[in-house]
Amino acid sequence: MNSGHGSRRYYRRKNTLKLIIPGDTTLQLRYLILDFNGTLACDGVLLEGVRPRLTTLAGHLDVHVLTGDTFGQARMALAGAPCRLTVLPAENQAEGKLRYIEQLGAHEAVCIGNGRNDRLALKAALGIAVIQTEGAAVEALLAADIVLPSILPALDLLTYPLRLIATLRA
């Protein structure tokens, strides 16, 4: 818990991150939903620095990875990582991701992705688009609340919530 200059701006409890965004809203997040290729990985290989950040965040949020698994490497790349992996069918992935998130509770989810098939998921309580080597679909950028150049600073926003609050405050 951080008091941030005398007033509480965020609270952490097991499986909950509550953010008080000045002039806007309060977010109570329980789920971190991530795309795999283009977000956590490039060409099916998990990016350096991702695994320890997922481990840290798993102490505060339930971590889920949703993917079409273009390269067939997601299960091996995430072996032992503190997350639940779901491989979606090739057809209607955007809708599949949205259904999954709605079943969890979209109002309690932060989603991070880069692809066109992430555009609906990024409309959860908090949507973060990342650009990275693969780029980002315009639809994903328009659906997101925040856009970052890569996954590491995106995950760090959740580890250091005052950064997130500073970006979102009105």
Image: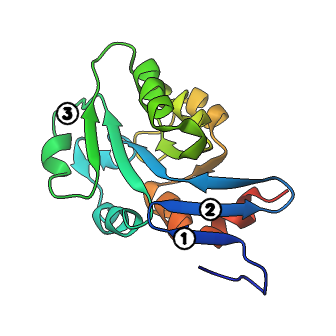
Residue 82, image x and y in percent?
Answer: 26, 58
**For the residue carrying disc 3, how many other residues have a C-alpha within 10 Å: few (<14), some (14-19), or many (20+)?**
few
Q: Label 1, label 2: how many angstroms apart (C-alpha)?
A: 6 Å
Q: What type is the residue that disc 3 sits on?
A: Phe
* Mark 1, residue position: 12
Identify whether 32 is placed above or below 18: above
Q: What type is the residue that disc 1 sits on?
A: Arg
Q: Are marks 2 and 3 in contact (CB under 8 Å)?
A: no
Residue 85, image x and y in percent?
Answer: 26, 41
* Mark 3, residue position: 71
Residue drawn at x 59%, y 29% as measured from the top left: 138
In this rendering, position of residue 92 left or right of residue 121: left
Residue drawn at x 72%, y 82% as measured from the top left: 4
Residue 168, image x and y in percent?
Answer: 74, 56
**For the residue carrying disc 1, how many other residues have a C-alpha within 10 Å: few (<14), some (14-19), or many (20+)?**
some
In this rendering, position of residue 150 left or right of residue 44: right
Check disc 1 and report its element: helix, strand or loop.
Answer: strand
N-terminal label among 3 and 1:
1
Q: Nearer the viewer, residue 38 or 109?
A: 109
**For the residue carrying disc 2, how many other residues have a C-alpha within 10 Å: few (<14), some (14-19), or many (20+)?**
some
